[in-house]
Amino acid sequence: MKIIHTVAEWRMIQKEFNLSSENIGFVPTMGNLHAGHQSLLQRSQQENTVTVLSIFVNPTQFNNTDDLAKYPRTMEQDYQLATDSGVDFIFAPTYSEMYADNYRYQVCENELSHLLEGMHRPGHFSGMLTMVMKLLQLIKPTRAYFGEKDFQQLQLIKEMVSAFFIDTEIIACPTMRDKNGLAMSSRNNRLTEQQYQLALNFPRLLRMQLPLPEIIDRLTNLGFTVDYIEEFQGRRFGAVSVGDVRLIDNFLIAN
Ligand code: AMP
């Protein structure tokens, strides 16, 4: 496994390994890898000859500076997990490598990105889409893998790739949950044991066949701060905070 930190190094690797003639599977992440990320890496390895993992905590998609500062960074542990998962290349650039333009150029979507997460995290989706666009242009993957846990993100990326004629297939992967049903997330590491026990009520209540205001009331009474519980295009979406840890989840609504 090779770890690459600069764009110039990556371009050299592309030539050296003749990557344009390979099927490249790409898994973009912000690190602090867990079984959710691992499932994407496994799928990539099954379907491609080369797997590239990127690790970059992208500041432009954080609307909250405290959330950015507290985002878990565990590089050594991530390198180990990537090695064990059979990753071929890790692309782990710095801010200045990715934003030589200082974020003067941005990808903006003007409908879906203002709903749900977008309503509560201004600028989040522009930051995310800009970063994914940069990474797709650089890595030039045959397929790129994204989790349904971030369903709105997945939808926006699929539509961006179509709108800009990008030659990468976007593959949706199911949400991985821990044994108690909580969707795996790097932010879960910041929950205390007591907060974790409370957090387990979120996926449980989100799934309940109750009117949405009732779900919001129950979550609020338990001590969650609720950003939204909404149904949209056949799915139920939710975002809550436990203390200062924000959690999101979504389910397909049974017909
Ligand atoms: P992140 O590092 O949180 O930005 O996530 C990187 C990728 O992993 C995104 O495509 C996420 O949707 C995906 N991912 C994160 N958590 C999970 C999970 N619990 N199950 C499946 N995919 C996930």
Image: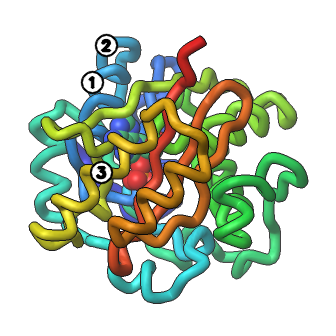
Q: For the point 13% across and 36% down, which residue is it?
A: 179
Image quadrant in which you'd find residue 51: top left
Circle 2 residue: 46
**Numbered label tally:** 3
Q: Secondary structure at mark 2?
A: helix
- Residue 4 coordinates in the image, percent (x, y): 35, 56
Q: Circles 2 and 3: CB distance less than 8 Å?
A: no
Q: Amino acid at mark 1?
A: Gln
Labels 2 and 1 touching (C-beta < 8 A):
yes
Give the amino acid at mark 3: Asn
Asked which secondary structure carries label 3, the reply is helix
For this rendering, which residue is in front, 111 or 51?
111
Q: Nearer the viewer, mark 2 or mark 3?
A: 3
Q: Image height check: is 24 above or below 176?
A: above
* Residue where numbered disc 3 is placed: 201
- The quadrant where ligand 1 appears is top left
- Amino acid carrying label 2: it is Gln
Colour scheme used in the picture?
A: rainbow
Q: Is residue 88 above or below residue 7?
A: above
Q: Residue at 18% of width from left, 31% of height from top?
A: 86
Q: Is residue 123 above or below residue 24?
A: below
Distance from the alpha carbon under mark 2 to that under mark 1: 6 Å
Q: How much space separates mark 2 and mark 3, taking CA atoms? A: 35 Å
Reading the image, the residue beneath label 1 is 42
Secondary structure, mark 1, is helix
Disc on the earlier residue, 2 or 3: 2
* Residue 53 in sight in this render: no
Work out whether residue 159 or residue 21 is closer to the camera in this orientation and state it.
159
